[in-house]
Each structure stands twice: as structure tokens, then as C-alpha cells.
Amino acid sequence: MKTAKWQPNATLSTTIFGITAIGVTAFVVLTALIFAAVIWQANRVFVSDVLGTLSAEAQTLVAVNETGQAETLPAIVAQLSKNRTDRLYILAAHDGRPIAGNLKAVPKELTTSPTGGLFTYQLPGSQSSDLRAAAGISIELPSGSKLIVARDIEEQRSLVRWLQVLAIAAFLAITVGGLYLGLFASRSVLARVERVSNATQAIMAGNLAGRLPVQGNGDEIDRLSQSVNEMLEKIEQLMHGLKEVSDNIAHDLKTPLNRLRNRAEAALRSAQTPEELSAGLGQTIEAADEIIKTFNALLLIARLEAGAIEETKEPVALSALLSDAAELYEPVAEEAGLGLKITDLDNATVSANRHLIGQAVINLIDNAIKYGRKSKSDAGHASQSGLIEIGLRRENGQAVISVADNGPGISAQDRARAMERFVRLDKSRSLPGTGLGLSLVAAVARMHNGQLLLEDNHPGLKAVLVFPLA
Amino acid sequence: MRMLIVEDDSETATFLIKALKESGHTAEWAADGVTGLSLAREGAYDVLLVDRMLPQMDGLALIQTLRKEGNQTPVLVLSALGEVDDRVKGLKAGGDDYLTKPYAYAELLARVEALSRRTIPGEQATRLVVGDLVLDRLSHAVSRAGEPINLQPREYRLLEYLMKHAGQVVTRTMLLENVWDYHFDPQTNVIDVHVSRLRSKIDKAFDKPLLHTVRGAGYVVREDS
């Protein structure tokens, strides 16, 4: 079995890959949105929290300013901002000149924002152009000077940035990983499909015993393969049956065809008078008729097996059908030295093709008359002629037709074998008739969801036909 | 009798024309459905023999067309399709009888002759008479030379069918189909047993037999000359 090769188009066009790609995209977009919302909201809550604290602090400072001397506030601001880098202050005169605090100047961003906001500033004493983020509140004092209270939030800011980078990296990883997983899954599925396809090709090429590979883990492909394998099993059986049927047909038709040919040849070769010739031709026609009968029976069985009778079903009263059949055969049985009587005759109606059920019943009676004479071992009771008993009973929602004789019957192990043979065609053709009688009965029974059973009549054979009631 | 054979196989048709001629009938031949239909419309035939599978026009379509046009010429459908449902389809389409290929010529002849008599009054007669044998279809009474004969119901129907076709050969299959309504061949010759029982009742006590066996074909009820 060849291994699956990397086929970009085949891999990308598989269902699994498509579903994975759509899933990954949707997941990434949704998560990005949620991430963005969370970060934005967290940022907002944090800033407003900081601003709230700052506002309270500023109010205190303003209160101090209002109650104390004018010099107190610059001193307090200077005191507060001394050696601090996280807390930022500036007290500026109305012209913007700084009076006290650790900020170099009033941030431009805050001059127009009396309720507070974000701004950037340069770290005092730092020469670099590094700008740090801060949140602050600006208050206009009655003197016209401006007080700004702020907090450095650079750390939070870099945390957010770091989070963003992390999120993007995670999304990239998810996208790449997801698509790779999709590719992998799709390739592995493709490889299995390839194996199944190879197995199918092999089976189509004539290896009917071939089966699809099953990994044994019970996944969906395994289950599918198993059902297909069951189907293949059935097909193999049917093909086997078909072969047996065609072998049987060949045998059944070739033998009488050969007989026909022999008779024609014999008439042609050795007939001396027109009478002999015409007798030979008569025999030839008889042989042809025999072939036609066999052929018709085979065709009918084939049609039944193909289930072609479904539309011809109608309600059939079995009691009438049985008494008609018994009436037709009673004189024939009598001529053969046998009694024929109906023992039970319940009312039972089945959904059936009347002609086929009729033919099945008649085949059984025909057989009973043919084989129903008492066997030699019973010769002691010679005065007691054989009896054919026909019965119709209703049992457990089923119509049970039985035709029983006192003949030699069929021994138990042969019965089992005989039943098996009915599945295909009867193999024993040495007896008179087409030899397809019982096969036909079994086929008719099967087509009516019924069954043909062969039982011991002690002595003799009891053929039982079981049909579901209509 | 004038017949029309609608059959696409020329060898079959030639054989039938020759055989029917030997039996005292004339037959014409159409090789396809359309020709068959136009001939059947124009010619006053006594019986049509129509194959089911024909070129240009299906045999059943041909019969349906004729029947729609009011043409009641008896039709014998000949077909390789012989299962019960095919037979039902053939008769539903307007065919009067159905014969499955391959058939014995005697069977075909008997059926064709039985069909042609359908148009002759006697089908509906209340009394059937052959020689001194009388069957009363109203009282179901049968008598020969004035002596009543006691028949079982099935024996009565058998005799009724034979007498309805008095003078015509009736095959075993026809009896099985028309008296018993079985459309298949039983293995044993059940019909012979029933006919011989009937014969023992109507012929045994009399000098002149009325129920004759026709070798290779069937039976006929006829007053022998």
C-alpha cells in the first residue's frame, strides 16, 4: 500500500482543513476583541481609580491652601514631592512659572483638562528624551495659580503594552498552531482516505476478499469502514451465491440440452422409417419442454430473489386457497394410492401474491405425492396406505401451513443440509421434475417474509410454511 | 380464419404463417408495431397475435390504442415475459389471452381458436348441447340421453368450459387457467386425472364417447362422426 504524498491542493481542499481554518480565524478574531475590551476596560478603571485618589488629595491640598497661609501650600507641595518619583506635583503661578513640585512644567495635556487626564512627562533629572506616562489632575487656585497632582503610571502602561504584545504573540501562535493542526489532521485523514481508496481499487480489481483497513479505535472513519466491510461481506456472499447459481444453471440446463441433442442425433442417425424419425422428433420436443420448465422455474426464483413481486401483493384467504389446492390434488393422490385430507383449516389472511403462494402450496403437495408412499421398511403395514395431511393454523400472529406425508422423509442431518441448500439452489437434481420445487417454495416464503421449515412427521416429512398474518 | 401476426422475428412469423395455413387459417405479418397497428385498423381480422416487445411501438401500446378506438378484435399476447404480473399487465392493456414464449404450437392454435369463437354467440347461452349431452347453466344440471349425471362443482365447471368450446381443442394449461385459475404448470399431470374422472361419469356408460384426448395437445368435446 503506498503512503500518502504531500499534495498541497488535496490537503488544503479537505473538509477538515476548511473547518479548522474557519474555526481558527473566528476564534482569533473573537478572542482579540475580548482581549482588547478587557485591556481597554481595565485601563479605564485603573485611570479613573487613580484620578479619584488624586482628586481627593488635591481637594485636601486646596482646603489647606484656603485655611492656611499663602506660603503653606508651596511648602507642602515641595515637601510632598521631595524624593518622590511616583507622585508628581507642581504648583505654578498664573503665568505658568513653577513655584514648587517635582514636575518641570505644567503638562500641556492638562491645561485644557480640569477634570484630569493622561499626560507624558520627562523624568526630573533625566537627560534622555524618555517620556513616561502619568495621570494627573489640575486645579485652578483662587490666586490664579495652578496646582497639579499626578501619579506616574508608566509601569501600568508598560504592563498593558506587554499584555498586548503577549496577546498578539498568543494569537499568532494559535493561528499558526491551529492551521498546522488542521493541515496535520487533514493530511492524516487524507492518508486514511487514500488507504481506503486503495483498498477499494483492489476490491474493484477483483479481489473480493479484500477489506477496508480498520484502525480499531472506533472513530468515525473506522465505523464507516466497518459498515463498508459488512457490505463487502454481504456482496462477497451474494457473488458466491451467484456463482453457485450460475454453476447450477449451467448444470441444470446443460444436462437436458445434452439429452435433447443426443435424442435428435440418435433420430437422425438410426431412424429407418418416417415413424421412427417422428418418434425421435417427439422425444426431442419432450426434452425441449423439460428445459423450458426448468428455465421458467429458475427465472421465477431469480425474479423472486430480486424482490419483483412487491406490487402484486393482495390480501389472500389461505383457507380457500388450501381447499382449492387439496381439491385439485385429491384425485391425483388417490390415483397414487394415497389419502389426502385437510386436518385443520383456520381462517387466515395474508398479504401475498396469490399465484405464488398457490404454486408454493402445490409444489409441497406435489412433492408429498411424489415421495409420500410408505418406505419399504414399513411394508409390514402395506394395507395401511400413506396419508397426506394438509393443515392451516393460526399461531402467534402467524399463518402456519403444513403439508405432511408418511414417506421416507429426510433424515435430520440431511434436513439441515437441505435447508442450507435452499439458500441457493437445490443441488440434488437426480430426482424427476425440475428439482427446483422446494427451492421455489423457500424463495416464495422468503419473499413474503415467511419461512419454509422441514420437520419430522414420524415417519415422513412435514413441510411447514409460516407467513405473517395480514 | 384471418389472422394478423405482429412479430419482429421473421423466422417465428414465417413458421407461424406456414403452420396456421396448414391448420386451415390465413395469416398476415407485420414486423413492427406501427405497421401492425395500421394493418389491424384496416383489415377485418378474426384474431390478432401480438408480440409484446416490438420495434417502433410496444405491443401493449398497440392493443391499448386499438381498444381506445373501439376495435374489439380478439388479441392473443405473445411474450417472453411470463411472470404473473406481466400477464396481468397484458390482460389489463386489453389482451384477451396471454401466451408465454417459448410455446407449443398446439397450445397457440388451441388458444387462437378459442379466442375467435368469443365473438360467436354461445358464450352467453343458457344451455350447452353436444350430441345427447346437455348442460343447463341455470340449474347446473347435466344429463346425457335424458339420464341425469351427478357432477362435483369442479367437474361441472370443467365440463362447462369444455362444452363452451365444443369442437375445439382445449389444452391442459387452458383448463388449469380457466377452471382452476392457476397460471403455472404443476409437475404432475393433475388435469389428466380430473378429466378421466369426468370422462368416467359422462362417457363410461355410453357407446359413443364425447370427451376425446388429442395427443400432444389436450382435450376436445365433440360428437364424433
Image (cartoon, coloured by chain):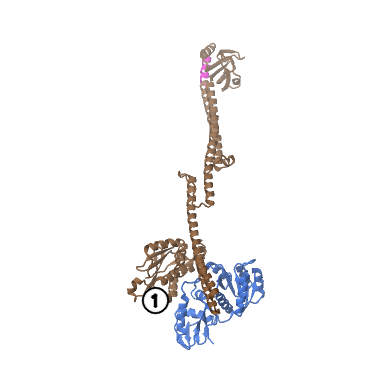
Chain colours: A brown, B blue
Direction left: furthest residue: A380
The answer to whether residue A141 shows anywhere in this view is no
In the image, A425 versus A216, the foreground residue is: A425
> Height in image: B77 above or below A136?
below
Left or right: residue B174 versus residue A411 is right
> Height in image: A70 above or below B19?
above
| Residue at image mark 1 | A337
> Height in image: A126 above or below A220?
above
Q: Is residue A385 magenta?
A: no
In the image, A394 versus A185, the foreground residue is: A185
The answer to whether residue A191 shows anywhere in this view is yes
Q: Main secondary structure of the magenta part?
A: helix
Label 1 neighbourhood size at 10 Å, few (<14), some (14-19), many (20+)?
some
Q: Quadrant of residue A417?
A: bottom left
In the image, B38 versus A113, the foreground residue is: B38
In the image, B19 versus A119, the foreground residue is: B19
Question: Residue A118's spot in the image, x, y percent?
Answer: 57, 22
> Height in image: A141 above or below A248?
above
What secondary structure is found at the residue carrying circle 1? Answer: loop
Magenta segment range? A55-65
Screen quadrant of the C terminus of chain A: bottom left
Q: Quadrant of residue A182?
A: top right
Q: Is residue A62 magenta?
A: yes
How many labels sit on residues? 1
User: What is the three-letter code of the residue carrying label 1?
Assistant: Gly
Question: Residue A165's spot in the image, x, y percent?
Answer: 55, 27
Left or right: residue B192 versus residue B55 is left
Q: Quadrant of residue A403?
A: bottom left
